[in-house]
């Protein structure tokens, strides 16, 4: 029996537990809320909001308003300075640095010891459990795991306290036994300079028996392309013949899928999407044939959902299929009724399965078109499929009125493979956007409100150059896809000259 065959048995009890997600979603979530209220009752936040007398969800909603980062920022900063029992019991030592809000360059999300173990590591554990369930012939543990991470730094110089990318915090605190089966070495994984780190990772990993890789698709692709250059190989299986799965998350995989399939031609290769963020680990693709993900209901996360078309906030058992919701979470890291900024759409409620549809602030609605990231991904995928093009990165924003008093959407796209006819690509993208979004279709009717979209071709490496100038190259940083303002797009267009 191979090593994976022996280790597989460790995951069997959890595989059975996960079956409760099929029909017991409401019970699991009510149990999570009860636990969170009990743990938080003696914190400053819990005392102020009457956790000790809160009997259930209805009471919880009555005495707790929805929070954004701005509402919790002051308390989080006090926690970062070493105060205990503020939002979560005890002293929280780790803070995941996330993309900024309107008022701040960065957000600092608390990561408690319980949250680290029962949310973030639990998600990683379940990723493996579900993968092994779906792939009984797997040899996952017979080789190494390449885990791509960011970097961290001391937090206000407090002892043992760190701030940085969530992935770096996970690597820093990982079970030492895991280091025996992962690459690169810890010092390399936590390097801050991504360009230096990318080459070191490639050189350290290229002679190892890597069976699985984990990370953000854009940054992982950069590492793998670097390794192809160093080794002179054409396909990744020439370097790692036993590679079998890529656990990916952080950004939508759709724009990168074709490039991965060209780089990895092995028929035994698998892809598994995960929904892990600085704020928590929320979803896993439990069925390889289904692009939607299973919402993870028994971690330290209680979910609520705000309909994007208006209406009352509902708990999990109040959601409907095919409706766009902003996600609100309460977690064992001390985030209480926290608006995370992501939007999701349920594809099933028995079990609860969903797709990420976008961001609450990542959309274009300058003219009532309500274009969301999910629409954009579908449109680009269709245009690429029809033309053979490959998109590496993109962003889009409105042109409110040009010299001819015309309004349109302007897309800046960096192609891995350019379409032969850029105008045709633009028409196909526009056509698909109208097909999947009736509001966009209405605004495009006879070009009355919106003119045909415009595509500007980005020079190679433009988005990475921009991210580097922002101090966001590598780690879990992302290119903003859609924006209602032209701030990011104008910065990029200036660099594109």
Image (cartoon, rainbow, N blue to C red):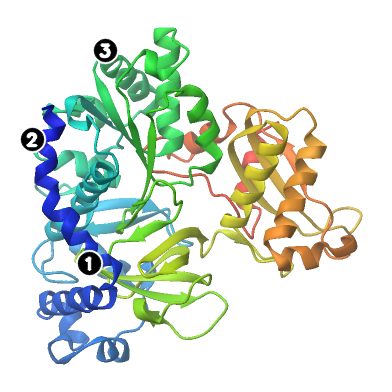
The residue that disc 1 covers is: 20
In the rendered image of this protein, does residue 336 appear above or below residue 256? below
Q: Nearer the viewer, residue 408 or 294?
A: 294
On the image, the x and y values in percent for residue 344 come to 47, 64
Do the numbered discs 2 and 3 sit on residues whose CB atoms are within 8 Å?
A: no
Identify the residue at horizontal 31%, vertical 32% (top origin).
Answer: 213
Identify the residue at horizontal 35%, vertical 14% (top origin).
Answer: 239
Point out the frontmost of discs 2 and 3. Answer: 3
N-terminal label among 2 and 3: 2
The residue that disc 3 covers is: 207
Identify the residue at horizontal 51%, vertical 36% (top origin).
Answer: 257
| SS assignment at label 1 | helix
On the image, the x and y values in percent for residue 298 come to 21, 66
Residue 317's tag is none
Q: Quadrant of the C terminus?
A: top right
| SS assignment at label 2 | helix
Q: Residues within 10 Å of mark 3 (few under 14, many from 20)?
A: few
On the image, the x and y values in percent for residue 414 come to 63, 34
In the rendered image of this protein, does residue 114 appear above or below residue 206? below
Rounded to the nearest angstrom, the CA distance separating label 1 from label 3 is 42 Å
Give residue 81's quadrant in the image: bottom left
The residue that disc 2 covers is: 176
Q: Nearer the viewer, residue 425 or 272?
A: 272
On the image, the x and y values in percent for residue 216 come to 39, 39
N-terminal label among 1 and 3: 1
Identify the residue at horizontal 40%, vertical 63% (top origin).
Answer: 353
Give residue 392's quadrant in the image: top right
| SS assignment at label 3 | loop
In the rendered image of this protein, does residue 142 appear above or below residue 41? above
Q: Residues within 10 Å of mark 2 (few under 14, many from 20)?
A: few
Do the numbered discs 1 and 2 sit on residues whose CB atoms are within 8 Å?
A: no
């Amino acid at each position: 029996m191979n090593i994976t065959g022996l280790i597989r048995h460790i995951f069997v009890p959890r595989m059975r537990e996960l079956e409760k997600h099929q029909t017991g979603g409401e019970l699991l979530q009510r149990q999570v809320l009860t636990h969170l209220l009990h743990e938080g009752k003696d914190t400053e936040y819990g005392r102020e909001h009457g956790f000790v007398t809160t009997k259930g969800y209805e009471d919880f909603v009555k005495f707790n308003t929805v929070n954004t980062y701005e509402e919790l920022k002051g308390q989080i900063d006090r926690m970062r300075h070493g105060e205990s029992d503020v939002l979560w019991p005890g002293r929280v030592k780790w803070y995941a640095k996330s993309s900024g809000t309107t008022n701040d360059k960065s957000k600092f999300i608390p990561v408690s010891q319980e949250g680290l173990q029962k949310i973030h590591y639990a998600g990683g554990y379940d990723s493996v459990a579900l993968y092994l369930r779906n792939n009984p012939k797997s040899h996952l543990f017979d080789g190494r795991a390449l885990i791509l991470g960011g970097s961290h730094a001391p937090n206000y110089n407090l002892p043992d306290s760190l701030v940085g990318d969530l992935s770096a915090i996970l690597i820093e605190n990982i079970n030492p036994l895991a280091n025996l089966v992962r690459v690169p070495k810890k010092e390399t994984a936590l390097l801050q300079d991504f360009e230096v780190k990318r080459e070191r990772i490639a050189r350290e990993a290229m002679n190892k028996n890597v069976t699985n890789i984990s990370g953000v698709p854009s940054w992982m692709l950069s590492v793998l392309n670097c390794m192809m250059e160093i080794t002179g190989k054409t396909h990744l299986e020439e370097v790692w013949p036993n590679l079998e799965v890529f656990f990916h998350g952080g950004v939508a995989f759709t724009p990168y899928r074709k490039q991965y399939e060209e780089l990895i031609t092995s028929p035994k290769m698998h892809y598994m999407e995960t929904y892990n963020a600085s704020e928590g680990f929320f979803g896993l693709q439990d069925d390889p044939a289904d692009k939607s993900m299973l919402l993870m209901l028994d971690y330290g996360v209680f979910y609520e959902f705000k309909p994007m078309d208006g209406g009352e906030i509902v708990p999990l058992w109040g959601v409907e299929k095919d409706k766009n919701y902003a996600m609100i979470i309460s977690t064992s890291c001390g985030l209480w009724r926290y608006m995370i900024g992501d939007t999701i759409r349920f594809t099933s409620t028995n079990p609860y399965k969903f797709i990420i549809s976008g961001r609450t602030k990542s959309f274009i609605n300058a003219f009532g078109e309500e274009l969301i990231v999910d629409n954009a991904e579908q449109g680009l995928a269709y245009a690429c499929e029809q033309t053979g093009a490959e998109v590496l990165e993109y962003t889009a924003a409105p042109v409110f009125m040009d010299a001819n008093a015309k309004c349109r959407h302007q897309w800046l796209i960096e192609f891995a493979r350019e379409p032969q006819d850029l105008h045709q690509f633009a028409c196909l993208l526009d056509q698909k956007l109208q097909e999947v979004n009736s509001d966009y279709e209405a605004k495009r009717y006879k070009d009355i409100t919106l003119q045909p979209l415009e595509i500007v071709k980005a020079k190679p490496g433009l988005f990475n150059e921009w991210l580097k100038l922002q101090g966001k190259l590598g780690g879990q940083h992302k290119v903003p896809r859609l924006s209602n303002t032209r701030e990011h797009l104008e910065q990029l267009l200036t660099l594109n000259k």
